[in-house]
Amino acid sequence: MNSIWSWKASIAAWETQWAQTWDPNYASPNDNNQGAYPFWVRQAYQWAEYNNENGNWPASNPAEQLDPGPGPFSSTYPSCQLPAMPISFVTNLNLGTFISEPYDGPILSQYWYGDAVLMKQLAGAADSCGHNAQYVSWNNSNPRVTPQWSFQKASLYSADIVYEFSTCSTLQSCVRHAMGPCNQ
Amino acid sequence: MTDRFGSLLLMAALGAAPALCQLHLITGSPNPLEPSGGYATLMLRVGVDGTVSQVAELTSADTGSHWIAVSNELRKAVVVPRDPAHTPVKVVDLDLAAVVKSCVVPAVGFAMEQWIWNIPGAGPQYVAYIGNPRGGDQLRAMSLDPSAPCERSFTNLSPTDAKYLAAAGYAGVADVASHDAMRVTINSDNRVNRLFSAIGKAYFDLEVPGPLYKDLEHPIAAIMANNQHLLALGVTEAADPRNQRLLVFRKADQTWRRVPSMSERSDWARSFGRFLAIAAAQTKSAKASESPGRDEWRKGTASTGPNLATRLADSDTVFLGRLDLYDVDSGQTYSIVTSQGDSEVLLIENDIVYYRASDRLYSAAIAKAGLGQAKLLAAADVIRDAHWAFIKR
């Protein structure tokens, strides 16, 4: 059974991953820093710069632009007794520096996008369809179209692991998002 | 030659072009938005007998790449790894088919956009628009001159230098490769500029004739290509990527024209001297939801490239399996039908077009009467990941 589930081993592995992912220098992100927070700060900064350069300021929050919400393949976890908690994510952008800063409340159902990126990294960014993507990224790769936020919420075991984490105050309150068919 | 490529050697010497012995390919697939890892960037040589052999590894699969650009006009290629502060940026001299310079970049900020600018007096530069939230953004240049040591190769440029952009366009299909284009704005007075948020504004010596674009309500624009012969300006209605056009400024007589619309989308446009090459594409719809040729696509990923099916599924675009050429001097158009969505023109030189369809490399002569018969030059799995080509002098 140890090879199937070991709380000690799992916690230790997560602690290691957390230490690698969390970077206290998130606000001075370099190309080489692939941690969740620096990645997110880079995305938010480019989003802010693009909108500033193109007169779209203040720009709408990523969630208002494109966030599709919890995955469409949701099904209630068998033991779930409670309806899913409504949650939302914020950029918490400092308008002076264009740095997206960690959000600590006061609204308990609001989370920082940096934490969403971190949660998905910890769960594994790749999904079963071959995507290896962050939870959210600023997609400005095609210069012929308007840049937009790109969400890839699925991981190997869930259609929306971040939503599962965020609604999971107890096991019974988890909402399970079953994987849908591969989009390819 | 590595064992891997030893096993990939395939014979396909079917009437190779005279210059084939010098034909080289560059593979690569930048993936800066993925959490980790990447794909190897390789320089390959195509032999007269159809063999494909590795000349150099420019980035490993572990290192991955952030950006790749090849300027056949300036005879340089630039390969930027994902971690350029620790793994060097490599400069390839296309005449020598060799790496002639390797420099790590200063560990300051992060690259938001990247280009090659050919600055008078200073020569070709790899320029990164660096975002640096607490220290100030920069237009950081690295000289591509191999005689300049790395410690004296980095300078900060002024936005006014942006008019020296040397761009060749968008390589690959979907987002499997990269581009060296620049987003710009067309002012109400028809002049083209680019604002670098915290640095300043760049003005280009360009005035676009209003009738070529003013029917668009909110045009967004990008300089897709800029060389000695032409400047190509892509213009799109901001809210509707289907409503786009490609305008070209012919430098010989300083005139603008609209490239004939051969397909709905012209995002994947590249320049080779006086030619523009466009991978015909259209926005996905219920009637056209998948690019043709799926049976030939590699299943899964490889060390040199991503899972194409996934990338095409994620794209909003269907690639039609046709490559269109436009000669800016004559206005003549040509079409190459491959019936394979994973197709692209890799090079046009001396009136010969070199193009890829899935894992096969072809050439065809370009004449006034039309295109000559296609010749299969080579076939190998790694050709799928080749998105640039050049001829060693």
Image (spheres, rainbow, N blue to C red):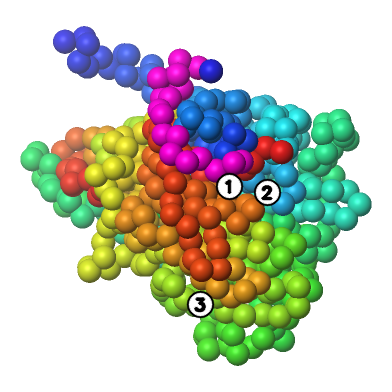
Q: Is there CB contact under 8 Å for labels 2 and 3?
A: no
**Above/below status of B137 relative to A125:** below
Q: Position of residue A21 (x, y in %)?
A: 49, 30
Tell me the subunit letter for badge 2. Answer: B
Q: Main secondary structure of the magenta part?
A: loop
Q: Which element is circle 3 on?
A: loop
Q: Are marks 1 and 2 on the same chain?
A: no
Q: Which mark is residue B260?
A: 3
Identify the image quadrant of the C terminus of chain B.
top right
User: Can you name the residue that lies furthest to the left here?
Assistant: A78
Residue A148 visible here: no
Q: Front-most of B271 and B308?
A: B271
Q: Quadrant of residue B226?
A: bottom right
Q: Is residue B74 magenta?
A: no
Amino acid type at image mark 1: Arg
Mark 2, residue position: B72
Q: Identify which residue is drawn at 65% across, 64% down.
A: B274
The amino acid marked with disc number 2 is Asn
In the figure, is residue B357 to the left or right of B287? right
Q: Tell if the residue under mark 2 belongs to the same chain as the one under mark 3.
A: yes
Tell me the crowding category of disc 2: few under 14, some 14 to 19, or many 20 or more residues within 10 angstroms, Cα based: many
Q: Residues within 10 Å of mark 3 (few under 14, many from 20)?
A: few
Residue B256, position as x, y percentages in the image = 67, 80
| Mark 1 vs mark 3: in front | 3
The Cα–Cα distance between marks 1 and 3, rounded to whole angstroms, is 39 Å
Q: Residue furthest top?
A: A2
Q: Viewer-proximal residue, B276 or B99?
A: B276
Q: Nearer the viewer, mark 1 or mark 2?
A: 2
> According to the image, label 1 marks what residue?
A42
Marked residue chain, label 3: B
Identify the magenta region. B2-19
